[in-house]
Amino acid sequence: SQTIHQWPATLVQPVGSPLSLECTVEGTSNPNLYWYRQAAGRGLQLLFYSVGIGQISSEVPQNLSASRPQDRQFILSSKKLLLSDSGFYLCAWSAGQTNQPQHFGDGTRLSIL
Amino acid sequence: AQSVAQPEDQVNVAEGNPLTVKCTYSVSGNPYLFWYVQYPNRGLQFLLKYITGDNLVKGSYGFEAEFNKSQTSFHLKKPSALVSDSALYFCAVRDIGGGGFKTIFGAGTRLFVKA
């Protein structure tokens, strides 16, 4: 069966520090991968998605970047964190067909001090 | 452009009563619709989907959803609510444009089930 791992679960970082959040998927090949941010336990904002290695689409201009160095690995990064980067970050994967649901990791709660 | 609306921020029901969480959508073409549930400090979990066929879709944990094309709705239902159903529920539509890689989520409805 397929599983998705996301770490760390919680992270506290000072303003201006770098960030690296990692997400890996097991049990499937060539998944579509996604990074979302969820503010205040409400709606999801799509940050990045990837349909293959090295292929990254950015949805909103921001202080973050994403990379996909391997088929089942998706990394969210920042060189210098801002206070506004605080939030709950969720990674998800889906199979290639458009009628398939997304499957989410358990998220990283990021607090910027 | 595809969009999805959840008109209620919160729904309160008593345990054992039926529950409905509302969702309406706007799409060009045939809709691919989904419901997800989120428990505190967890990721979203897939409940059910409508792609084609029978308008009543059954999913996990006793939930079902009714697709109504004329009303462009996809309401989530359960005949008898449990306290453990209390969570945040998201309706979503697959954005077919641009290859269908993206999913548009509603703002979420918080369900409270009182014992």
Image: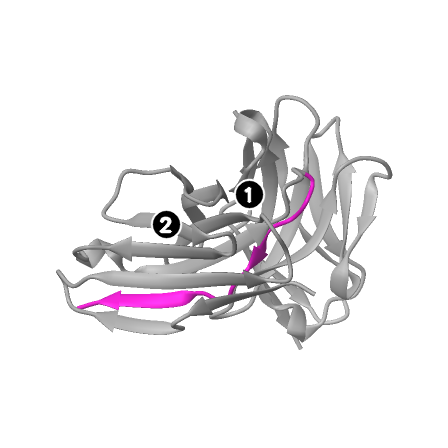
Tell me if residue B105 can be seen. Answer: yes
Please state the extent of the stretch shown in magenta in the rendering.
Answer: A99-113
Q: Which mark is residue A29?
A: none
Chain letter, disc 2 residue: A
Residue at the spot 24% in from the left edge and 54% down from the top edge: A78
Q: CA distance from mark 2 to mark 1?
A: 36 Å
In this rendering, the label closer to the viewer, 2 or 1: 2
Q: Residue furthest left?
A: A16
Q: Amino acid at mark 2?
A: Ser
Residue A28 among those drawn in magenta: no
Residue at the spot 60% in from the left edge and 37% down from the top edge: B94
User: Which residue position holds label 1?
Assistant: B7
Q: Residues within 10 Å of mark 2 (few under 14, many from 20)?
A: some
Residue A59 rendering spot, x and y as whole percentages: 38, 37
Q: Which mark is residue A67?
A: 2
In this rendering, the answer to whether B36 lies above or below B106 is below
Q: Amino acid at mark 1?
A: Pro
Q: Residue furthest bottom?
A: B115
Q: Residue furthest top?
A: B28
- Is residue B90 shown left or right of residue A85? right
B25 and A73: which is toward the camera: A73
Residue B83 rendering spot, x and y as whole percentages: 66, 74
Element type where label 2 sits in the image: strand
Residue at the spot 65% in from the left edge and 56% down from the top edge: B46
The quadrant in which residue B30 appears is: top right
Residue B87 rendering spot, x and y as whole percentages: 58, 65
In this rendering, the answer to whether A103 lies above or below B83 is above
Residue A76 rendering spot, x and y as whole percentages: 34, 55
